[in-house]
Amino acid sequence: MKLTTKGRYAVLALTEIALSEDKNLIKISEIAKSQNISSTYLEQILSNLKRNGFVKAVRGPNGGYKLALKAEEIIMSDVIELIEGKIETKGCSQKHISCTGISGKCLNHDLWDELGKQINLFLSHISLKDILEGNILGRSRAPILAQDCDNMTIN
Amino acid sequence: MKLTTKGRYAVLALTEIALSEDKNLIKISEIAKSQNISSTYLEQILSNLKRNGFVKAVRGPNGGYKLALKAEEIIMSDVIELIEGKIETKGCSQKHISCTGISGKCLNHDLWDELGKQINLFLSHISLKDILEGNILGRSRAPILAQDCDNMTIN
DNA sequence: TATTTCTTGACAAAACTAGTCAAGAATTAT
DNA sequence: ATAATTCTTGACTAGTTTTGTCAAGAAATA
């Protein structure tokens, strides 16, 4: 199981663009150079981020990119879904034994479905601002179990 | 972002094997037929599961597979890691601006690292037994935020 | 007008996924 | 013993996806 470089590069580029906000615009070539990524490859990714309203581009001398939204409005689940596509939770074909469960639904389906939700939920709580502030660590959390609810009170 | 069929097939095969436990052994060809998967492709996967002690194989007429462990001992994170490999949280190269953060560590690194943990944590709480019992739904949970702790008491 | 920088789309090598094939080993029924 | 059944292993391959490259062009500015 792995994430593609495209998703990583997208978040990376956004981070660099955000960090240069005060110095006006940042060029593709600058990001590519500092990160040692092919700048023509980055173009594709930034172009995609632009088309979808995450960044703005300015052409011509001293041009470059800047954020089109505030850092706290750029949510990782949106970025990753754009670049990598929706998390696939493809079901199974319908004839096998596992599909004769309680609901007639595939017993495995829930697993992949819930895993997709889990990933999405995690990423939907993280904004570019969180990344800039180094505010990510320790956010993992075990899935809900029945007994969790018994021992817990929300005041 | 997507999971490969190999991982899905592995969990599927385990489910079918578990469901046939009472009727003794189940053959690759039976699983393959009911699920409409190539049986030669399944062989690879089951062979891998066997080598790593999740299932046992019996050769010869009326042979087939059975679980080598109890269903509650077969943990999804172990299965998926075996079949799909470790979740990659590859870092970044070291020279870009994002890496001059507080710790000198890449600001993006934490994101991928924590996402990997999140996925692993989710899967490590799900056994084959949970799948058989349809006990998966609703286990997604948002990441921990600082304010969560303030409003929460464990009795 | 020349230069810089983004824009777009076609193209391509490399890696990976998904699957096939074949020769063989172990087991059981006859 | 022998034949049939079933798993075992490894080599091979077609197709897709990833990770880029390349080139022609459009917009902006000095």
Image (cartoon, coloured by chain):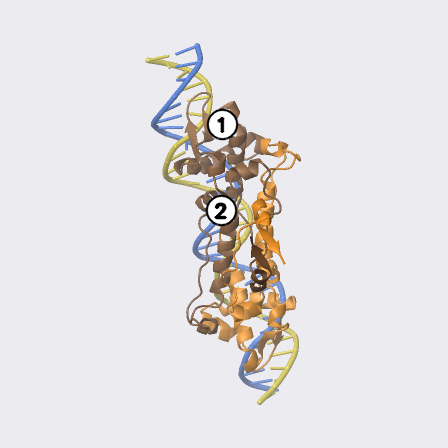
Chain colours: A orange, B brown, C blue, D yellow
| Mark whose residue sits in front, 2 or 1 | 2
Q: Nearer the viewer, residue B89 or A9?
A: B89
Chain ID at mark 1:
B
Q: Nearer the viewer, residue D26 or B82?
A: B82
Look at the picture and state if A52 lies above or below C13.
below
* Quarter of the figure with residue A128: bottom right
Look at the picture and state if A122 lies above or below B27.
below
Of all residues, the one furthest to the front in this rendering is B155
Please give the count of numbered marks on the rendered protein. 2
Q: Residue B17, percent across and down?
A: 51, 31
Local crowd size for mark 2, using a 10 Å CA cut-off: few (<14), some (14–19), many (≥20): some
Mark 2 vs mark 1, CA separation in Å: 28 Å
The residue pinned by badge 1 equals B27
Query: In terms of sequence position, does the residue under pointer 2 or pointer 1 come before the other?
Result: 1
- Label 2 secondary element: helix
Q: Are circles 2 and 1 on residues that touch, CB within 8 Å?
A: no
Mark carried by residue B124: 2
Instruction: Give me the residue at 53% from left, 27% from top.
Output: B20
Chain ID at mark 2:
B
Q: Is residue B122 visible?
A: yes
Q: Residue B69, percent across and down?
A: 44, 34
Instruction: Give me the residue at 62% from left, 56% from top.
Output: A154
Q: Residue A74, percent across and down?
A: 61, 67
Which amino acid does the dot numbered 1 rest on? Answer: Lys
Which amino acid does the dot numbered 2 rest on? Answer: Ser
Instruction: Give me the residue at 44% from left, 48% from top.
Output: B85
